[in-house]
Image (tube, grey):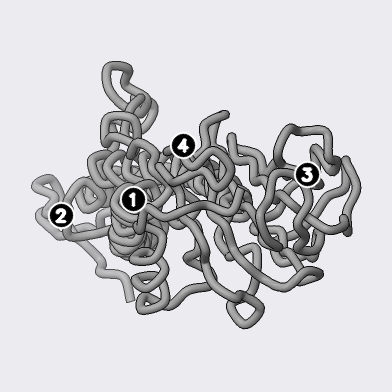
Amino acid sequence: MAKVKYYYDNDSLSYKKIEIKRQKKVQNVLAFLLASAIFGISFLFFLLSTPTLSTPTEISQAREIENFKLNYTQLQRKVAQLEEVMLDLEKRDNQIYRVVFETNPISNDVRKAGFGGVNRYENLEGYSNSDLVISTTKRIDILSKQMVIQSKSFDEVQKLALDKEKLLSAIPSIQPIKNENLTRMASGFGWRTDPFTKSRARHKGMDFTAPRGTAIYATSDGVVIRADNRSSGYGKHIRINHGYGYVTLYAHLSKYNVRKGQKVKRGDIIGFVGNTGRSQAPHLHYEVIKDGIAINPINFYSGDLTPAEFEAMLEVASIENQSLD
């Protein structure tokens, strides 16, 4: 119930009821509402300007920022793990793979080049978490480049491995006659007595005595470049080009099992022991030629001989005796 207000009238010496006009009432109400609205809005702005109160949007954004920070922290841990793996790969690449294949290691300057000078992360600056974002982004960029370089390096190592495999398959590495078929290793490489002139002469290969018709084996992969008797003193002979400067020669054969231009593999039967050409008895004269120069074949039996057998052959081959051709 609204309070009724009175005033004292001096003329009538009595109290009279205060009558407020309707228009005045409306004005008072409007003024109160306006004042309340102004006060309410001012108080709201005050609250919003203080850190103690956040809007739902700000609360949601704050949560997102915290989630981003957590994700970046986890990402940094993963990047650190990947960096350790990459460092291990780089060490293996430089200290093992490239050493094995006799090629130069890749320097750290090359692996990590291209990240100085220009500021690539200017667009990420100016934010509250710019340092974290820029640091993580830069580490990922460096890691990405290292991965590209390492991938190319492994491609190169793979090629080197294939080339090495071809080289190993080209190097003579077995005896041309099996041990069980040998009568003896008659004469080695070096100065020997010529059986016909009885004077000292340079013997360019090794002589293996074996019964006529004994199988002769290609000592490595290659292509037959000669299979004829048109070379003085060698009689029927075969020459195989193995590549990388290696050629092997097999002389005094009784017959051939290959023809010129034929590809052969290590261990293929290419001919048979004989006594053709300048020869005193059935045997195989075997030469290994590198870049046009005859070298000692005894260094190329690693695929056949045990250490003890090699020592025994080395002792016999070092005796300066009479050759058979």
Q: Earlier in the sequence, mark 1 or mark 4?
A: 1
Instruction: Work out how far the residue at label 1 is from the one at label 4, CA to CA, in angstroms.
Output: 54 Å
Q: Earlier in the sequence, mark 4 or mark 2?
A: 2
Tell me if I can see residue 55 in this picture.
no
The circle drawn on residue 201 is 4
For marks 1 and 2, give the one nearer the viewer: 1
Instruction: Work out how far the residue at label 2 is from the one at label 3, CA to CA, in angstroms.
Output: 155 Å
Q: Earlier in the sequence, mark 4 or mark 3?
A: 4
Secondary structure, mark 1, is helix
Q: Are marks 4 and 3 in contact (CB under 8 Å)?
A: no
Q: Would you identify the image quadrant in which residue 89 lies?
A: bottom left
Nearest to the observer: residue 181 or residue 305: 181
Q: Position of residue 191 (x, y in %)?
A: 40, 42
- Residue with the mark numbered 2: 7
Q: Are marks 2 and 3 in contact (CB under 8 Å)?
A: no
Query: Tag 3: residue type?
Result: Gly
Residue pictured at 21% horizontal, 53% vertical = 47
Instruction: Work out how far the residue at label 1 is from the one at label 2, CA to CA, in angstroms.
Output: 102 Å
Query: Tag 1: residue type?
Result: Glu
Secondary structure, mark 3, is loop
Secondary structure, mark 2, is strand
Q: Is residue 265 left or right of residue 88?
A: right
Q: Position of residue 135 (x, y in %)?
A: 27, 42
- Residue with the mark numbered 1: 90
Q: Earlier in the sequence, mark 1 or mark 2?
A: 2
- Residue with the mark numbered 3: 235
Q: Earlier in the sequence, mark 2 or mark 3?
A: 2
Location of the N terminus (image quadrant): bottom left
Q: Are marks 4 and 2 in contact (CB under 8 Å)?
A: no
Instruction: Work out how far the residue at label 3 is from the one at label 1, CA to CA, in angstroms.
Output: 56 Å
Q: Is residue 119 above or below residue 82?
A: above
